Amino acid sequence: MEQLNLYQNNYLIVFVFLCLGVLLPIVALFAAKLLRPKYKQDERKYTTYESGMEPFSDARVQFNVRYYVFALMFVIFDVETAFLFPWAVAYEKLGIFALIEMLIFVVMLLIGLIYAWKKKVLKWI
């Protein structure tokens, strides 16, 4: 009987935390809505703001997609170093299996780099 009571108490704790996890954000958002200052809507509020100056051109400027792809490639290879460093530090303890896994990982990254190079993604304009 005592184990059943302990079992139910575990679920009760989970249920209490689930309720708190749902109720706290709702209460916080509702309180923020009640306490925020209320301003009269003004047309000037919806205009583009550029250092106090009147806007002189459209703010939506189109960029070449290559800049974003170049940044994404940087992030990918930056994350690669985050995986390589701990492996290199603990190499002696990990053994040959970890070496093979890391070689497969690096080869996959090299295949992606070669693919991007062939598609001329890395060519800076």
Image (cartoon, grey):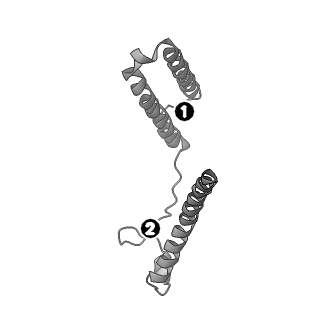
The answer to whether the residue labelled 2 contacts the one labelled 1, judged by CB atoms less than 8 Å apart, is: no
Relative to 77, is 120 on the left or the right? right
- Give the residue number, with chain letter if any, for mark 1: 121
Amino acid bearing label 1:
Val
Relative to 34, is 5 on the left or the right? right
Q: Residue at x 49, y 37 (%)?
A: 70
Vertical placement of 65 versus 113: above or below? below
Give coordinates of residue 81: x percent, y percent: 42, 29
Closer-to-camera residue (48/109): 109
Q: Work out how far the residue at label 2 is from the one at label 1, CA to CA, in angstroms.
A: 33 Å
Vertical placement of 108 versus 15: above or below? above
Q: Secondary structure at mark 2?
A: loop
- Give the residue number, with chain letter if any, for mark 2: 56
Q: How many marks overall?
A: 2
Amino acid bearing label 2:
Phe
Give coordinates of residue 90: x percent, y percent: 39, 21
Closer-to-camera residue (125/95): 95
